[in-house]
Amino acid sequence: MTRSRLLQKEIAARCRTLADLRAAWSDKDKREALIRDLEAQNVSPELLARLLEAPDADAYDLLAHLAFNAPLVSRDELAKAFLSRNQDFLGRFKGRAREVIELRGCEILDLLP
């Protein structure tokens, strides 16, 4: 069995579906427990990023891609998608505030669950 298949099994053993993974990831305590469980099996987001040659991918996206074949997107792509999807909300911000949001998109995503 390949290393990728073993990693996939480790993740899928904890989250049977992509929806389960998203639900676990949305809850801080469950997300931290999932990461601890995976790290106890020598699976870390950093390892996955190296194995998948995706150093700019988010940990959730790495897990979702490996376990459930979800698209692997970079943090920059996530930020651009967020900015694009939320134009109505972001339109409320003007001047410097808008500039900061647009320049710091990836860092804003870190604040979201």
Image (cartoon, grey):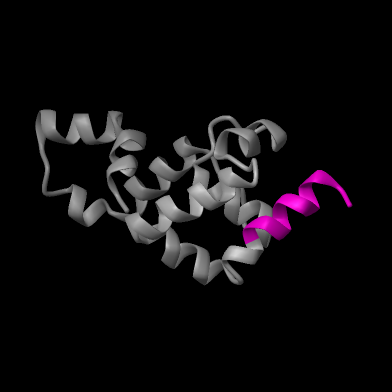
Residue 4 covered by magenta stretch? yes
Question: Is 26 displayed left or right of 62 in the figure?
Answer: left
Task: Where is residue 96? Give x, y as percent.
Answer: 12, 28
Task: Where is residue 110? Give x, y as percent.
Answer: 33, 41
Give me the residue at 46% from left, 63% from top: 22
Give me the residue at 48% from left, 41% from top: 77
Q: From which residue to which does the magenta span run?
A: 1-11
Question: Residue 68 sits in which quadrant?
Answer: bottom right
Question: Is 21 displayed left or right of 71 in the figure?
Answer: left
Residue placed most toward the observer, 1 or 98: 1
Is 33 placed above or below 105 here?
A: below
Question: Is 49 displayed left or right of 33 in the figure?
Answer: right
Residue 34 visible somewhere in the drawing: yes
Question: Is 73 displayed left or right of 78 in the figure?
Answer: right
Task: Where is residue 86? Give x, y as percent.
Answer: 28, 54
Residue placed most toward the observer, 62 or 100: 62
Farthest residue to the front: give it.
Answer: 40
Give me the residue at 40% from left, 42% from top: 80
Give me the residue at 61% from left, 71% from top: 16
